[in-house]
Amino acid sequence: MPARYAIGVDLGGTKIATGITNFSGNILARRFVPTHASEGETAVIARIKESIRHIMDDIDASLEEVAGIGICCPGPLNPETGVVIMAPNLNWSHVPIVSHIVEEFGIPTFLENDANAAALAEKWFGAGQDVDSLLYITVSTGVGGGIILNGDIYRGRNHMAGEIGHAIVQPEGGVQCGCGQYGCLETISSGTAIGREAQNVVAEGGGQRMAELAGGIDGITAKTVADAAAEGDPDAEAILERAFMYLGTFVVSMLNILNVEKIVIGGGVSKLGDNLFEPVRRVVGEKMSDVPAKYTPIVPAETGDNVGILGAVGLVVKSAFRAPTK
């Protein structure tokens, strides 16, 4: 019986999302369960196995019909050995998750960093289907990304490529990042950074409309800032302009370095729409020399909330249709 399905597992600190698709990325069944990471790796892996069995039963699929299983989760990890080296939100250290899954199901299983998998999801099933190279940027609580070159994930020598949130864009006077450095992109352009900057502005007597919309300074988020900006609050407008000016400047650098065919931006903050895309596109237009890369499309991601599942599925589809390259 020929294989016709792929399974994707999106393993996060609070939730495990599992889906089974055809090779076109159409999700045929999904399951969401709590991770309960505090119960330990054995319990979490057992929950993954149970979820896989459950979605196969949902569509009456046999193992012979499944081409493989893809798993994505935060890193660092080693896709070649299938080992999660360290995942603080899971409290995992050197967990050979792939071997556990292969032992259970006996079919090809792949592991990838969640941001890289998201980039692959956009390449196979989303906004990047028409190109062979793209930079995927996720702007959410933090800032992350993945690089697709020649149709495949570019991981770098130690599987650490694409950590774009830690690109230093404000070396003088920047906020300290969780990585220990100052002025990382994540400290300026993430949803967390936008909310923090707005709280600082309100604490200093400005942006009162933001405080009103949030019901107090502590409730201010990036969405609050966007809502206030839509009403013409100049302080909110300035906060977004600063955040996305730095994001746009970073994109300029990456276009000059990588010369990819498309920039795809996803994550929760990308849902701000033109509030994000307009300043990013404007900065690229202003700061890039008049070379072809200046006109690279900068577009929203298309895989939405299914990006993790589809990214993991993409690992299987990529392997089934083209041998992976390093």
Image (cartoon, helix red, strand yellow):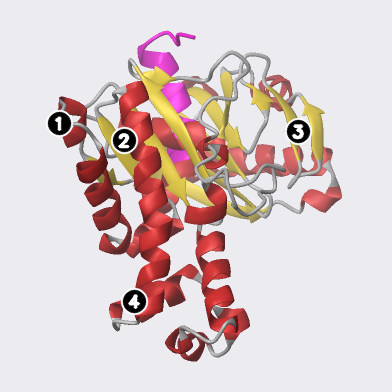
Q: Which of 57 and 280 lies nearest the eye of the viewer?
A: 280
Label 3 element class: strand
Mark 2: few, some, or many residues within 10 Å (few <14, many ≥20)? many
Q: From the image, tell me which residue sits under label 1.
A: 290
Q: Amino acid at mark 1?
A: Asp
Q: Residue at x 25, y 61 (%)?
A: 274
Label 2 element class: helix
Mark 1: few, some, or many residues within 10 Å (few <14, many ≥20)? few
Q: Name the quadrant containing residue 181.
A: top right
Q: Residue at x 47, y 89 (%)?
A: 208
Residue range corresponding to the magenta coloring = 309-326
For the stretch drawn in magenta, the main secondary structure is helix
Does 28 sit above or below residue 67? below
The answer to whether residue 1 of the structure is visible from this angle is no
Mark before the other along the chain sequence, 2 or 3: 3
Q: Amino acid at mark 2?
A: Phe
Q: From the image, tell me which residue sits under label 4.
A: 229
Label 4 element class: helix
Q: From the image, tell me which residue sits under label 2.
A: 125
Mark before the other along the chain sequence, 3 or 1: 3
- Residue 271: % across, % down: 36, 61
Nearer mark to the viewer, of 3 and 1:
1
Q: CA distance from mark 3 to mark 1?
A: 43 Å
Q: Quadrant of the N terminus?
A: top left
Q: From the image, tell me which residue sits under label 3.
A: 86
Mark before the other along the chain sequence, 4 or 2: 2
Q: Name the quadrant containing residue 28.
A: top left
Nearer mark to the viewer, of 1 and 4:
1
Label 1 element class: loop
Nearer mark to the viewer, of 3 and 4:
4
Q: CA distance from mark 3 to mark 4?
A: 39 Å
Q: Amino acid at mark 4?
A: Ala
